[in-house]
């Protein structure tokens, strides 16, 4: 699942979490994960625990419009491809189908 939550979700974050939980994805990519890394990943950690996707990584940008990926399956590898101005991240996970790169 991919979701642009618009400017970090703000006051809509609980509604966003509720919607994601209803869909129950195995992997989720969030665009505009603004502030997810603030205060030692406070928002990212809360988000991760509440949606049940305990593995996550965040690709930061200099403007704060970060990209985050969350997964039920542990990451085998995680790499930020385009740091700073633009954000992109790739992860590898082992699945019942073999190695998957997202």
Image (cartoon, rainbow, N blue to C red):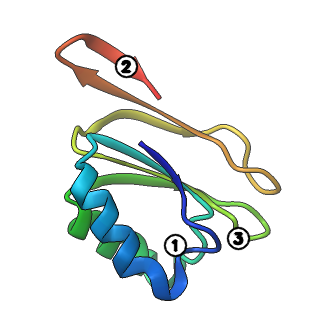
Specify whether residue 53 is in view: no
Q: Earlier in the sequence, mark 1 or mark 2?
A: 1
Residue count near mark 2 (Cα–Cα under 10 Å), binned few <14, some 14–19, many ≥20: few
Residue linked to disc 3: 64
Q: Mark 1 and mark 2: span between their CA atoms?
A: 26 Å
Residue at the right extreme, as displayed:
85
Residue linked to disc 1: 37
Q: Residue at x 70, y 70 (%)?
A: 64
For discs 1 and 2, the disc positioned in front in the rendered view: 2
User: Is 14 drawn above or below residue 78 in the view shown?
Assistant: below
**Rendered image: mark on residue 100:** 2
- Lateral position of residue 71 relative to residue 72, left or right: right
Secondary element under disc 3, as helix, strand or loop, is: loop
- Lateral position of residue 6 relative to residue 76, left or right: right
- Nearest the eye: 50 or 37: 50
Q: Mark 3 and mark 1: span between their CA atoms?
A: 9 Å
Q: Residue at x 79, y 69 (%)?
A: 63
Secondary element under disc 1, as helix, strand or loop, is: loop
Q: Residue at x 22, y 21 (%)?
A: 95
Q: Residue at x 67, y 37 (%)?
A: 81
């Amino acid at each position: 699942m991919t979701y642009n939550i618009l400017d970090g979700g703000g006051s809509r974050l609980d509604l966003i979490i509720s919607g994601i939980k209803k869909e129950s994805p195995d992997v989720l990519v969030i665009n505009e994960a603004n502030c997810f890394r603030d205060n030692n990943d406070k928002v990212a950690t809360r988000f991760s625990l509440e949606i049940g996707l305990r593995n996550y990584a965040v690709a930061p940008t200099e403007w704060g419009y970060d990209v985050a990926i969350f997964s039920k399956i542990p990451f085998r590898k995680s790499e930020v491809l385009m740091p700073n101005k633009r954000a992109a991240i790739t992860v590898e996970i082992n699945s019942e189908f073999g190695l998957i790169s997202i």
